[in-house]
Structure formats: structure tokens, C-alpha cells
Image (tube, rainbow, N blue to C red):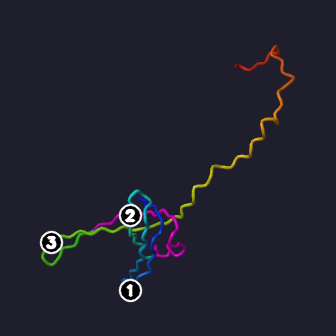
């Protein structure tokens, strides 16, 4: 899955435990009703955000994660997380491959050596 939009926020890396670290990114989608999507990057993926800045347009590849937690009363609670694993910059729409300019119409001269009587071997 992918999320595209502009970077709204890049949080600093958090060392959650001795062996686990995470970094959060917020991407604002470009829709009629923009959404602010919090995406978590963990472990070695935290470094992927080092070269990005707030305001840049990006495409983020994500995985949805879910887990169950049983509270002290024995009730099941469910939590979801959005985990990022790749980030790409989106380039502004580039114009189609540029074509050389067409010469002005008066630069063309009609053919003068054309003979309709001449036989050619073209099938059309």
C-alpha cells in the first residue's frame, strides 16, 4: 500500500527500549478532505527520513499492522499501526519530452517536380 502527500512533520528518533527505536512521519494527503496520516518507521528504517524536509511531496510505502491486547478485566482491545518501509520524493509534473519547434508554414515550398502520371509501386 502507498500514501502520497506532503510531509507535515518529521519527529526525532525515539529510543523506546535498549533494542527498539522508532521515528514518526506525518503526511498530509492531497484530497478534497486532506488527511494527516501518522506513519511509523522502526529500527533501521528510521534513517530513511534523514534526507527529507517538511513540505516535500512524497510517496510512502506502508504496511498496516494490527494487534490484540487483553486488559486486566479480560476484555480484548485492538490497536492498528501504519508502518513505513520506503519513502520516495515525488517530482513535479514534468512536461512531455520537449519537441523541437516547428518551422513556420511559409518555410515550406510545394513540390514542383511531382508527376501524377509516374507509376510507383506503393500499395496505396
Indicate the secondary structure of the residue bearing disc 1. loop
Residue 19 sits in quarter? bottom left
Task: Determine if the magenta segment contains residue 62.
Answer: yes
Per the image, the residue denoted by label 2 is 35
Mark 1 sits on what residue?
18
Q: Nearer the viewer, residue 58 or 66?
A: 58
Q: Tell me where residue 11 sits by quadrant.
A: bottom left
Q: Which residue is mark 3?
A: 75
Q: Nearer the viewer, residue 97 or 123?
A: 97
Q: Is residue 1 above or below residue 19?
A: above
Foreground pick, 37 / 22:
37
* Helix, strand or loop status at disc 3: loop
Horizontally, residue 67 falls left or right of residue 61, namely: left
Tag 2 secondary structure: loop
Using the numbered discs, state the Cα–Cα distance from disc 1 to disc 3 in whole angstroms: 30 Å
Q: What numbered label is drawn on residue 7?
A: none
Residues in magenta, as a range: 44-66
> Crowding near pointer 2: few (<14 within 10 Å), some, many (20+)?
few
Q: Earlier in the sequence, mark 2 or mark 1?
A: 1
Question: For the image shown, how many numbered marks are present on the structure?
Answer: 3
Query: Pointer 1: residues within 10 angstroms few (<14), some, or many (20+)?
Result: few
Q: Residue at x 43, y 72 (%)?
A: 25
Q: Position of residue 48 (x, y in %)?
A: 50, 72
Amino acid at each position: 500500500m502507498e500514501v502520497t502527500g506532503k510531509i507535515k512533520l518529521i519527529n526525532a528518533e525515539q529510543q523506546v527500549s535498549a533494542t527498539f527505536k522508532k521515528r514518526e512521519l506525518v503526511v498530509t494527503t492531497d484530497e478534497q478532505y486532506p488527511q494527516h496520516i501518522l506513519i511509523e518507521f522502526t529500527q533501521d528504517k528510521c534513517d530513511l527520513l534523514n534526507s527529507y524536509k517538511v513540505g516535500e511531496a512524497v510517496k510512502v510505502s506502508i504496511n498496516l499492522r494490527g494487534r490484540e491486547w487483553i486488559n486486566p478485566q479480560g476484555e480484548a482491545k485492538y490497536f492498528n499501526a501504519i508502518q513505513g518501509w520506503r519513502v520516495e520524493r515525488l517530482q513535479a509534473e514534468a512536461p512531455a519530452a520537449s519537441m523541437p519547434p516547428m518551422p513556420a508554414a511559409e518555410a515550406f515550398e510545394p513540390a514542383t517536380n511531382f508527376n501524377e502520371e509516374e507509376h510507383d509501386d506503393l500499395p496505396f
